[in-house]
Amino acid sequence: MANILILGAGGFGTALAVMCDKCGHRVTLYSPFQQEIETLSAAREHKKLLPGVIIPPSVGMIWQLPERSDADLVIVATPSFAVRGVCASVKGILSPEAVVSCVAKGFEQESLKSLSVVIAEELPHNSVVMVSGPSHAEEVARGVPTTVVAASRNRAAAEFVQDTLMNPTLRIYVNDDVTGVELGGALKNVIALASGACDGLGLGDNAKAALMTRGLTEIARLGVAMGASTETFAGLSGMGDLIVTCTSMHSRNRRAGILIGKGRTARQAIDEVGMTVEGYTATKCAYELSRKRNVEMPIIEQVYAVLYEDRSPDEAIRNLMDRPKRHESEVIWLLSR
């Protein structure tokens, strides 16, 4: 049995709390928002995000952190913009032996840093493990079979997360390619926005399949430029997460994209979804990273223009379809440039 501290009481944090409790671990769920914790404690259910999923009474809930934590495993389950702040809040209370894992997917917008780098800067004495893959909170909480990957530069830390969290409904693989795992998890949200827009426009399966396939190519192209392995993008955090996020109505990013395809502005779509849409910020970060690395990412460029420059989805599609001809092979294309 492990002592697990979960930072963030949203949908995924709550889902993990329920799952970890079922596995026999001692679980504490933290949110800095007193009202949120009081509401969850009284209802023992996240009525907005996980209706019908009961939070067992054995799951502790706190809105004030202790002076010292005996957690063996800390799980960061906040939106990407809150990762640095919540990690700073536990600085000094964790044992250096505690492993810090993160299920958030995205970048720090101002610095373009990956979340593993952000966590390491705030908690330099703790090993960091990034957990990613096709894993909707709605299904994890209900025990639907799910498979993810735990990536770390410290193999022992990744295997600790694997051993601690793996159970009959959650299978975990380990991976050393932290950069690839993080990029796949963050950038699939951008493609999911575009995929949703295809659905909102009423385009067919052909267009959506092409978008997902070429979108994954762009993600891998940037990843390789940043030192990732191509193989990672064919795995759970790449292809796996892309498929589930582009096709499921559990996906906030796809739902926002559908609304954009139907004529809403990006801000109207995000407000209507009513929850964090990570793809909005990730699009800007991906666009800036592609320019910084001189990596051609036409789909990312068009999504950026739709979200931030008021380009219509129809015009974005025309721009993509009218691009010059090229070879599908990345190697042959790069050699011909």
Image (cartoon, rainbow, N blue to C red):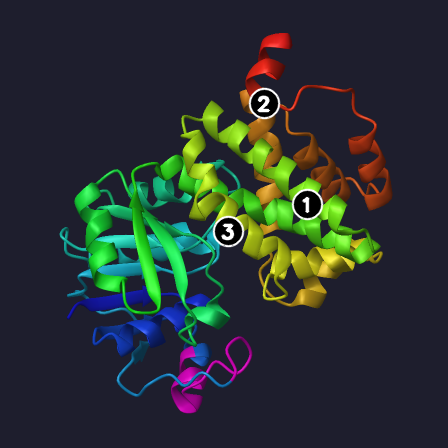
Residue 102 on the magenta span: no
**Left or right for 274, reference 13:** right
Amino acid type, label 1: Ala
Q: Which residue is drawn at 71% across and 67% down?
A: 272
Residue 266 seen in render: no
Q: What stretch is highlighted in magenta?
A: 37-51
Mark 3 Cα-neighbour bin, 10 Å: few <14, some 14–19, many ≥20: many
Q: Position of residue 135 (x, y in %)?
A: 46, 60
Q: Quadrant of the N terminus?
A: bottom left
Residue 272 seen in render: yes
Q: Where is residue 35 in the image (x, y as percent from the top left)?
A: 46, 80
Q: Earlier in the sequence, mark 1 or mark 2?
A: 1
Q: Look at the numbered disc 1 and give the secondary structure of its residue.
A: helix
Q: Position of residue 154 (x, y in %)?
A: 21, 41
Q: Name the residue under label 3.
A: 241
* In front: label 3 or label 2: 3
Q: Residue at x 26, y 60 (%)?
A: 74
How far apart are the alpha carbons under marks 1 and 2? 23 Å
Mark drawn on residue 295: 2
Q: Which residue is drawn at 39% across and 50% down?
A: 84
Question: Between residues 158 and 269, which one lies in front from this camera angle?
Answer: 158
Assess whether mark 2 and mark 3 are in contact (beta carbons under 8 angstroms): no
Residue 194 versus residue 180 in the image, above or below = below
Q: Residue at x 43, y 83 (%)?
A: 40
Residue 289 versus residue 283 in the image, above or below = above
Q: Mark 1 points at which residue?
A: 209
Mark 2 Cα-neighbour bin, 10 Å: few <14, some 14–19, many ≥20: some
